[in-house]
Image: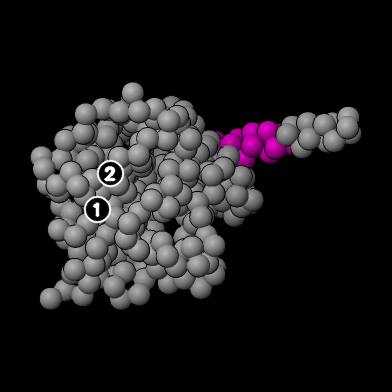
Amino acid sequence: MTLGADLPLTIAICSNRRDSLPGAVARTAAVIGPRDRLLIIADMHAHQLPTLSTNSSPPLSRVRVICNEGNKGLAYSRNKAMKEATTRHLVFLDDDIVPTTEGLTQVRAALAAGAHVTGTRITARLQGRGCPWFLTSGQLHYLGSHAPARPASIWGGSFAIDSEHARLLGVTFDERLGRIGNSLTSAEDTTFVREMTARGATAMVLHDAEVQHLIPAHRLTLSYLLRRAFWQGRSEARRNDACHGIRKEWTRNCSGDGALSVRAALTVLYTGSVLLGVLREALAQNRISDVDSETRGGR
């Protein structure tokens, strides 16, 4: 028997996209184990919730839906999932991920072996569309997907945690980060993993376990990718990691495939967008500090 084959999991889907939820629930319900629970955190009002069908597998008794009664953000939803999960081990899947039984089997084994955080490789599925010239493997991380030729790291689209150990360490998701509203804020996942490992938690990347990330057409545009890079810069500034973040983005963008001249141009273009995001966030934080100072001075 595979290590941890009977380990019960709570599979959490946190989403603010009503159009994506039905498909996400159906895909996940088809692969979860007999002792697993499916937890849907809908970042919306209850009246916005679409009809969700699991085809009675798992039974409705093992499915729970919680509405945030508003758009409170992905990090808020992840924290709520940690509080509401009925099992020690919690798997987070984005609403555009295609999970597999084999992937969940490897996740169970890693958690049973003592991993406190584990994640799978995430592969972009363009759904029959061609790859545009401005998207190389160096920009796939802006689509939440790993570059094929590079090692995977633990990202929020498909990862699992020992939530009891996280509580013992006092680690939660930073609610200044992660998607909220129409913003493309990110890094709530990698910040969580960083804090866990900094406090002694064991992290394991499952390089041979793969899930697919369904990429919609609107994300395969230059305007979306530049906006995503801009918000990456804002996110790095919010977690006080701007300098390292800019260097990291430069290296990632340089690593793309294709002609050297194209790669060089894209590196400057996308990293420049990241830098603009860092500057924009710095201005916003300075403005908040000035307002706070004026408020305190007026008391």
- x, y percentage for residue 219? 35, 31
- The residue carrying mark 2 is 64
Q: Is residue 58 left or right of residue 19?
A: left
- Near mark 2 (Cα within 10 A), the count class, few <14, some 14-19 or many ≥20, is some
Circle 1: residue type: Arg
Which image quadrant is residue 237 in? top right
Picture residue at 18% right of the left edge, 43% below the top: 60
- Give the prevailing secondary structure in the magenta stretch: helix
Picture residue at 22% right of the left edge, 40% below the top: 25
Above or below, 117 against 94 in this view is below
Q: Is residue 297 left or right of residue 227?
A: right
Whether residue 257 is visible to the viewer of this picture, yes or no, is no
Question: Mark 2 or mark 1, which is nearer the start of the sequence?
Answer: 1
The numbered dot on residue 228 is none
Report the residue that reaches farthest toward the front. 61
Reply yes or no: does residue 47 show up in magenta.
Answer: no
- Near mark 1 (Cα within 10 A), the count class, few <14, some 14-19 or many ≥20, is many
Circle 2: residue type: Arg
Above or below, 146 against 5 in this view is above
Picture residue at 78% right of the left edge, 35% below the top: 292
Q: Quadrant of the C terminus?
A: top right
Q: Are marks 1 and 2 in contact (CB under 8 Å)?
A: yes
Q: Nearer the viewer, residue 14 or 290?
A: 14
Whether residue 288 is visible to the viewer of this picture, yes or no, is yes
Q: Across the whole image, how many numbered discs are drawn on residues? A: 2
- x, y percentage for residue 3? 21, 75
Above or below, 164 against 42 in this view is below
- The residue carrying mark 1 is 37
Q: Which residues are magenta?
A: 272-286
